[in-house]
Amino acid sequence: MSYVEGTVADIVYRNEENGYTVLDLDCEGNLVVCVGNIPLIQPGEYVRFYGGYTTHRTYGEQFKVVSMESKMPESDESIVLFLSGGLIKGVGEIIARRIVEQFHADSFSIIENNPRRLAQIKGISPKMADKIHEQYMGLQTIRGVILSLQNMGLSIKEAMAAYEVYGQSASYLIEKNPYRLIEDVPGIGFMKADRIAAEIGMEGYASLRLESGLVHILKLKMEAGHTCFPMDAAVKAAAEFLQAEPQEVLQAAERLVGRGALSENTYNGVRAVALSTAYLAESYAAYRLVQLSKATPKIEVSGALVEGILKDDEMLSEEQERAVMLAASCPVCVITGGPGTGKTTILNQVLTIFEKSGIVTALAAPTGRAAKRMENMVQRP
């Protein structure tokens, strides 16, 4: 990974919500445009940014920052730039310059350890001196946490996201259990958390790794459509992935079941396991379907009309005809099947039956893309 280093000359743009920053870095007289999630950086700081050059189609060459090292400014002018950079409210260039003219290289030490001395300066009251101290210490705390998380292997963006979740306890909590990042911080998966855990040599690493690895495997299975999986197969897959003994993974699974993180059931004599969130979601869906199936339809569809429409359609198979009749007569119906099995054909006939019965229909889909595809296929909004 390449790097650039120099003094922050100017903050061109900063998004206060996510920390995305565009700045000019003075690298021995050459200005380099640097972009990325760079927390609480101020003009005047001497930094080393790690990352790589990219070319923006509008703004040209930029250095995209992944991580950084920083040291506080030392010269009078760079200290003025830092204090007046906007992160310490109430301190503009005039006040910043007065502070530096009074204390020079000791300015930061005075702000941190003896802030009441700031009240000696024209324009700074004792109350304002305390506020400057509080803001400065808050900045240093956040910066310290972010840099600590970077040292663990998180990028600046990931470190900021972790700080948003855990606050000042971020370093402590992650050192205790890096795998918690998987659930708590968007964008951090098992592989990243596992690398952090291996590097810091955390206590209880082996058991936590087995548990998190098994959950990771079950999530991958769920992404492939398997919300429930045979226990033996899940244990085998996790053992191979983690290069661990199957018996150890099985024990990890049993611990997770005991804590309620996984749900274990037996289906047709096969011991199966699922993420508890998936099991609860499917259980609730089944419960709601049962409740809906007991409802009485407000409008009845003419059986003769259904039979007439089906008789005229010679393309439907017997199974498709049964599906149409079921959907037209029941309060709720679930039709499943892979691509090309005739689900859209069934839907078209059901809609035709409802429309000829004077029933107003509404179509819905889980995503905008799916909704548009369905609209195009059935020619109805």
Image: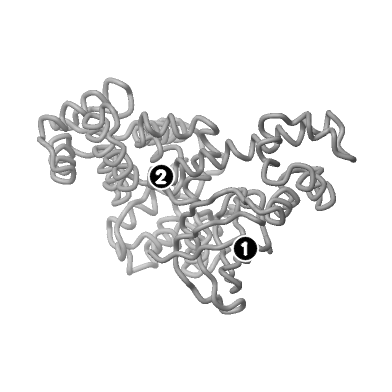
The answer to whether residue 135 is left or right of residue 171 is right
By what rule are the colours in the image chosen?
one colour
Q: Closer to the camera: disc 1 or disc 2?
A: 2
Residue 289: name its quadrant.
Answer: top left
The residue wearing badge 1 is 22
Q: Neighbour class for label 2 at 10 Å: few (<14), some, many (≥20)?
A: some
Which comes before the other along the chain, label 1 or label 2?
A: 1
Q: Residue 286's x, y, as percent?
A: 38, 34
Check whether the beta carbons of the residues at disc 1 and disc 2 lie within 8 A of each other: no
Q: Residue at 60%, 67% (x, y): give it.
A: 26
Q: CA distance from mark 1 to mark 2?
A: 23 Å
Whether residue 356 is visible to the viewer of this picture, yes or no, is: no
State the residue in front, 22 or 354: 22
The residue wearing badge 2 is 151
Residue 217: name its quadrant.
Answer: top left
For numbered disc 1, what is the local secondary structure?
A: strand
Q: Residue 82's x, y, as percent?
A: 69, 51
Q: Residue at 18%, 42% (x, y): give it.
A: 242
